[in-house]
Amino acid sequence: MSTMNVSLPEAMKKWVEQQSATGRYSNASDYIRDLIRRDQEKNAQIARLQALVTEGIESGAGSRSMSDLKELALERTRQKQK
């Protein structure tokens, strides 16, 4: 594993130390790695959503009405809840 030194303002350093002290993380590095992992996941989700938006825009205008789309969305939601 590589090492990286990071300079933090005192308030941020205390925050990291407090998060480590909760017991959820074994040390400051563990906490920082978790933050980076979550940021990577968030950016991947944003990229997926952007790709879907782009796909929708590039597909052109649809033929369904807004009420048809709303009903379809509600039906899919009901099916997922079963």
Image: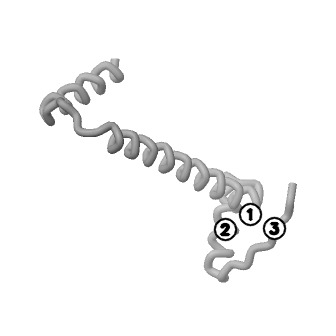
Image quadrant where one finds the C terminus: top left
Name the kind of residue labelled 1 in the image.
Ala
Q: Nearer the viewer, mark 1 or mark 3?
A: 3
In-front residue for pair 35/13: 35
Name the kind of residue labelled 2 in the image.
Val
On screen, 72 above or below 40? above
Kind of element beneath mark 3: loop
Residue 57 is labelled as none
Q: Earlier in the sequence, mark 2 or mark 3?
A: 3
On screen, 26 above or below 68? below
For the point 40% across and 45% down, the residue is 54
Name the kind of residue labelled 3 in the image.
Met
Percent x, y of residue 16: 67, 68
Q: What is the distance, in whole Å, between disc 1 and disc 2 at their CAs?
A: 6 Å
On screen, 12 above or below 35? below
Contact (Cβ within 8 Å) of mark 2 with mark 3: no
Residue 28 is labelled as 1
Q: Nearer the viewer, mark 2 or mark 3?
A: 3
Percent x, y of residue 13: 68, 75
Contact (Cβ within 8 Å) of mark 1 with mark 2: yes
Contact (Cβ within 8 Å) of mark 1 with mark 3: no
- The residue that disc 3 covers is 4
Left or right, 37 with respect to 67, comes to right
Quarter of the rendering containing residue 18: bottom right
For the point 25% across and 29% down, the residue is 73
- The residue that disc 2 covers is 16
Kind of element beneath mark 1: helix
Question: How dense is the environment of label 3, judged by Cα within 10 Å: few (below 14), some, or many (20 and up)?
Answer: few
Quarter of the rendering containing residue 52: top left
Percent x, y of residue 47: 50, 48
For the point 35% across and 42% down, the residue is 58
In-front residue for pair 27/4: 4
